Amino acid sequence: MASKSLTCMALVFAFCVQGVLGGGFACEQLDKSACAFAVSSDGVRCVLERTVVRGEAESYVCRASGIEATSDRLMVTNWIETDECVAACGVDRGSLGISSDALLDHGFTRKLCSPQCYRGCPNIVDLYFNLAAGEGVFLPKLCEVQGMSHRRAMSEIRSSGLVTEGPVAGRSNALASGPVASLSGGILATAPVGAPF
């Protein structure tokens, strides 16, 4: 019952945000509290950056990262990540840039691989799927071995030969297969497949 009410609240929030922003937005229109893990109407991931001007206090700006969120696995535009997914996946809205460093933290990967995150937050899962692939790690395999010690799990993945494929020749944005979902205007069409649970 609580799950249904959270889902309804998330959808209402998505529609409200979409209405306030006029149905679409550029990353540069977002403030610090909404930037990280957002995807613009152009399908580009937003990134929070800190700027310091001499003699002035530091400030935060939201910019387009140049990384497309739309791929063969995920179609997402006009998406501001929900507070529920931020909490379920253990990510931080104050994160600067986009990095795979969090994947080395056992507590983070445990939350990322939890059913609440892995099955319910395809935007975040797809982002970290691609970041893991860039490090030669197959995220579903990492999630599968979460029960092991973290060091053993990482060595198991690296020595198993189950690393992801690199980019597909002739297709600059194509990566190895992974979670499949579609988000458009903040509406979840399908959930990720291949969940480890």
Image (tube, rainbow, N blue to C red):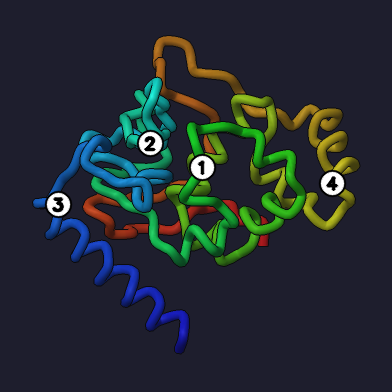
Q: CA distance from mark 4 to mark 3?
A: 42 Å
Q: CA distance from mark 3 to mark 1?
A: 23 Å
Ranked by sequence position, the earlier of labels 4 and 3 is: 3
Secondary structure under the numbered disc 4 in the rendered image = helix
Tell me the quadrant of the picture where the C terminus can be found: bottom right
- Nearest to N terminus: mark 1 or mark 2: 2
Q: Secondary structure at mark 3?
A: loop
Q: Is residue 35 left or right of residue 25?
A: right
Residue 150's label in the rendered image is 4
Q: Can the viewer see residue 71 in this picture?
A: no
Q: Residue at x 65, y 58 (%)?
A: 111
Q: Amino acid at mark 1?
A: Ser
Q: Which mark is residue 59?
A: 2
| Residue pointed to by mark 1 | 95
Residue 136 in the image, given as x and y percentages of width and height: 68, 26
Q: Is residue 132 left or right of residue 6?
A: right
Q: Residue at x 18, y 43 (%)?
A: 25
Instruction: Label 1, secondary structure: give it.
Output: loop
Q: Residue at x 37, y 52 (%)?
A: 33
Q: Which residue is mark 3?
A: 21
Task: Check the image and name the residue furthest to the front.
Answer: 55
